[in-house]
Amino acid sequence: MFQRETDQKFYPFVINDMIGLDSAGRRNRNIHVKDIKEAMSGHIKDGYTFNPECKILNEDRHFQDCPTDNDKVHVLVCVIDATKATHLKPKVVETIQNCRDEAADLGIPHVAIFTKIDEACPMIRKDVTNVYRSKLLKSKIERFSKNVGIPLSSIFPVKNYLTERKLNNDVDVLILNAMRHIVEIGDDFLNKK
């Protein structure tokens, strides 16, 4: 649950995760796009394991015939490794674009989270507060945006916690900023319905 300050309401926050697109073959990527559309439409129940061999069937116990708004996706989030973002295979780019097209058909907004920004840029590795000063990261984000069509204002850079044993406020700010924007975008989507 997530609570917004402005209205003191609690919102459910659910993450649907699946295999990375770069590790799926052509046939499996096409199946993923179909399953992703079903998930966005609310037809896939919690607990379903995405199967790279076949798409979900209407007879599957995890298929939901009559989804409610709580079952549906309100924001499509694409998580991208910043170290690989400018070297994506054309088929992966195409799959991301296809998923975005499916989301657009459903009216669902889409964003991207750029992870591992410290590994992608030595300047950020030294000091994560350099995130918005890094020309290298800016270039990677711009190229990714151009390749897949996600607007620059909808791409959020974050640093992953990997070996740290303590929380770091500068890292947390990036993560929480991305989360706040995602929740606000989802809230706007629901309010437009």
Image (cartoon, helix red, strand yellow):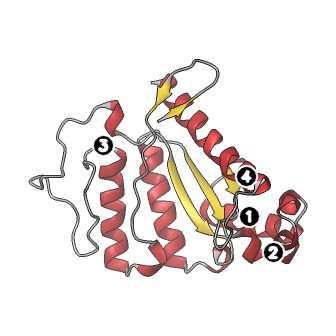
Q: What's the residue at 53%, 43% (across, down)?
A: 109
Residue 152 visible, this angle? no
Mark 4 lies on a secondary structure that is helix
Q: Which residue is mark 3?
A: 42
Mark 2, Cα crowd under 10 Å, few <14 / some 14-19 / many 20+, is: many
Whether residue 143 is visible, yes or no, is: yes
* Few, some or many residues within 10 Å of mark 4 (<14, 14–19, 20+): some
Kindly identify which residue carries mark 2.
121
Q: Depth check: give the residue in front, 139 or 45.
A: 45
Give whichever of 144, 69 is nearer the camera.
Answer: 69
Image quarter of residue 42: top left
**Tag 4: amino acid:** Leu
Q: Is 103 located above or below residue 78 in the figure?
A: above
Q: Which residue is mark 4?
A: 174
* Mark closest to the chain's N terminus, 3 or 2: 3
For this orientation, the residue located farthest to the left is 59
Q: CA distance from mark 2 to mark 1?
A: 12 Å
Dot 2 amino acid type: Cys
| Quadrant placement of the C terminus | top left
Which residue has dot 1 on it?
141
Q: Amino acid at mark 1?
A: Ile
Q: Where residue 81 sits in the image (x, y, percent)?
A: 62, 71
Q: Residues within 10 Å of mark 1 (few under 14, many from 20)?
A: many
Q: Secondary structure at mark 2?
A: loop
Mark 1 vs 4, N-terminal side = 1
Residue 13 location, x and y as percent? 46, 41
Is 183 placed above or below 100 here?
A: above
Q: CA distance from mark 4 to mark 2?
A: 16 Å
Quarter-of-image position of residue 117: bottom right
Q: Amino acid at mark 3?
A: Gly
Query: In the displayed structure, would residue 101 be above or below residue 11?
Result: below
Nearer the observer: mark 1 or 4; the answer is 4
